[in-house]
């Protein structure tokens, strides 16, 4: 049977891409071709992975030729980067340009670009909140600006439409992906317990009390599916977050209770520094509780913790545009924390 929609997902195995694939293939009428350098070995219904190097224009053209009549392209890749810094513009723009030029074919109906909170300069310091999609840009470089400008300029001469999502810090149940706040906090709690330490908040004091927001990866994927298909989303960018805000000062005691630990104090220090050399402690936890044999870096990327717990200013985006255009889903963030942690425990990734 020929599917009505054939989506090409660039970066199909990443934090965003994996969930976009899940959501699309669970919907009748959709087939997916996923691009990445290291395709998964196990097969899935309605998904075909094609080994591609997005940095190579020829490789992108070959991948699209092998995919068939692509109707939607979702771009959720990025080149390697250091936490919290300015991400490389030439490589990120080249990757996007190569795959967009290759998939700019007659059958194409929509292009979706995943951007993020760095659009507003959240990595530079305080920014205007709640962030509005039309807020003025910060001084370049910012690869998101170049990618969106390239896409919208090309679209002006084409029949397809575009959309872009701007999620904030993405959270998920993703065993083996250390760059995930939920498993990072769970691993930190397990190490606190094992070493007899209180559940201190290791980060900037201002961060503990400021307003913050997160984006659940599945919620983001559902919003992307909405943008791919709803004409009200055409040719626009949308902030996508859980739709609520929180303060760590409210969440941290709740998490301490969940882990059965004493809620500690705020310590203005680096997780990456204090977790250095704790691999043996983690390996001991894995053995003691008969967890899946994942290494500490597969459960917690501490530098990512330092980036998140170092933002001592409000991180809030307005969800008004998406809601008014028709996407009204939301996540209750405190409940999401507990739900994700329960799944991690059930999957024997956390004790
Ligand atoms: N994660 C977050 O918390 C977050 C928050 C806000 C915004 N965002 C944005 O969301 C977008 C996606 O980020 P992500 O976190 O999902 O990325 P990610 O987890 O690092 O995934 C990157 C994906 O791209 C593939 N890839 C990387 N280089 C490639 C290349 N040269 N050729 C082919 N495939 C390549 C990777 O697979 P291979 O390694 O196998 O190639 C993987 O599938 C980015 O724009 C990011 O800034 C992310």
Image (spheres, helix red, strand yellow):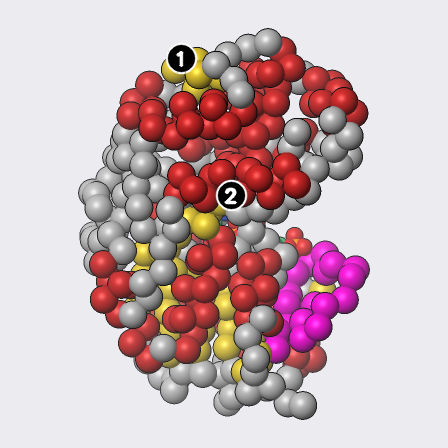
Q: Residue at x 50, y 12 (%)?
A: 198
Tag 2 residue: 339
Residue at 46%, 28% (x, y): give it: 255
Q: Which residues are magenta?
A: 31-50
Residue 38 belongs to magenta span: yes
In the image shown, does 344 or 2 lie closer to the viewer? 344
Q: Is residue 160 above or below residue 162?
A: below
Mark 2 surroundings: few (<14), some (14-19) or many (≥20) residues within 10 A:
few
Residue nearest the observer in this picture, 198 or 319: 198
Residue identified by numbered label 1: 265
Of callouts 1 and 2, which one flags the residue occurring earlier in the amino acid sequence?
A: 1
Residue found 20% across the figure and 43% down from its top: 128
Query: What residue lies at 52% left-to-right and 55% top-to-bottom?
Result: 16
Instruction: Estimate the x, y position of residue 280 in percent, counting from the top left.
Output: 74, 18
Quarter of the rendering containing residue 154: bottom left
Quadrant in which the C terminus appears? top right
């Amino acid at each position: 049977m020929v599917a009505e929609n054939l989506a090409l997902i660039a970066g199909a195995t990443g934090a965003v891409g994996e969930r976009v694939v899940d959501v699309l293939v669970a919907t009748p009428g959709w087939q997916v071709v996923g691009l990445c350098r290291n395709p998964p070995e196990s097969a899935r219904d309605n998904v075909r992975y094609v080994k591609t190097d997005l940095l190579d224009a020829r490789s992108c053209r070959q991948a699209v030729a092998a995919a068939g009549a692509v109707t939607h392209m979702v771009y959720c890749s990025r080149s390697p980067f250091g936490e919290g810094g300015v991400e490389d513009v030439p490589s990120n723009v080249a990757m996007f340009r190569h795959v967009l030029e290759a998939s700019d074919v007659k059958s194409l109906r929509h292009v979706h670009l995943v951007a993020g909170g760095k659009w507003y300069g959240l990595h530079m310091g305080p920014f205007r909140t709640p962030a509005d999609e039309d807020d003025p840009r910060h001084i370049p470089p910012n690869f998101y600006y170049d990618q969106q400008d390239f896409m919208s300029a090309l679209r002006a001469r084409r029949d397809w439409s575009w959309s872009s999502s701007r999620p904030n810090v993405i959270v998920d149940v993703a065993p083996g992906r250390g760059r995930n706040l939920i498993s990072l906090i769970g691993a930190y709690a397990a190490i606190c317990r094992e070493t007899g330490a209180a559940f201190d908040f290791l980060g900037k004091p201002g961060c503990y009390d400021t307003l913050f927001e997160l984006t659940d990866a599945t919620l983001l994927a559902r919003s992307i599916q909405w943008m791919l298909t709803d004409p009200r989303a055409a040719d626009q960018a949308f902030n996508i977050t859980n739709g609520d805000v929180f303060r760590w000062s409210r969440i941290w005691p709740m998490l301490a209770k969940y882990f059965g630990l004493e809620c500690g104090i705020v310590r203005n220090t680096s997780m990456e520094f204090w977790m250095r050399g704790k691999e043996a402690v983690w390996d001991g936890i894995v053995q003691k509780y008969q967890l899946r044999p994942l290494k500490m870096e597969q459960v917690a990327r501490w530098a990512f913790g330092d980036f998140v717990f170092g933002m001592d200013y409000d991180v809030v985006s307005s969800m008004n545009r998406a809601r008014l255009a028709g996407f009204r889903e939301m996540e209750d963030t405190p409940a999401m924390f507990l739900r994700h942690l329960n799944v991690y425990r059930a999957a024997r990734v956390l004790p």
